[in-house]
Amino acid sequence: MIHKIWDEKKTIKQVKCIHTKAEKYVVENVLTEGNLYEVKNETEEFYFVVDNKGKVSGFYKDYFQEVK
């Protein structure tokens, strides 16, 4: 049940959204190209970020670029 407290977790890193062109899903409603997002959790395939609606949501890593 860790997903219930992700919004309270410390930010791991920041990523920048580089595109919102999804084949199957509508992501332009919750991500904005060029914005920075806080990563709360990460898997091999996904970043779990605080999206534009203020919720932690999972997105494929190919939408993002790591900010150093």
Image (tube, rainbow, N blue to C red):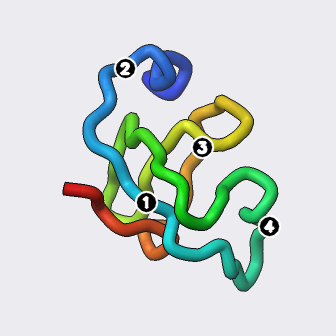
Residue occupying image coordinates x 55% and y 20%: 4
Disc 2 element: loop
Which one is closest to the eye, mark 1 or mark 4? Answer: 1
Residue identifier under label 2:
9
User: Disc 4, disc 3: CB below 8 Å?
Assistant: no
Residue identifier under label 4:
26
Q: Quadrant of residue 59?
A: bottom right
Mark sitting earlier along the chain (2/4):
2
**4 or 49: nearer the eye?**
49
Local crowd size for mark 1, using a 10 Å CA cut-off: few (<14), some (14–19), many (≥20): some
Q: Position of residue 53 (x, y in %)?
A: 73, 36
Figure check: 27 above or below 24? above
Mark sitting earlier along the chain (2/3):
2
Residue identifier under label 3:
57
Disc 3 element: strand
Amino acid at the residue labelled 2: Lys
How far apart are the two marked residues, 1 and 2, measured between alpha carbons? 19 Å
How far apart are the two marked residues, 2 and 4, measured between alpha carbons? 26 Å
Residue occupying image coordinates x 19% and y 56%: 68
User: Disc 2, disc 4: CB below 8 Å?
Assistant: no
Q: Position of residue 56 (x, y in %)?
A: 57, 35
Amino acid at the residue labelled 4: Val
Residue identifier under label 1:
16
Figure check: 57 above or below 32? above
Q: Position of residue 46 (x, y in %)?
A: 43, 59
Mark sitting earlier along the chain (1/4):
1
How far apart are the two marked residues, 2 and 3, measured between alpha carbons? 14 Å
How far apart are the two marked residues, 3 and 1, measured between alpha carbons? 15 Å
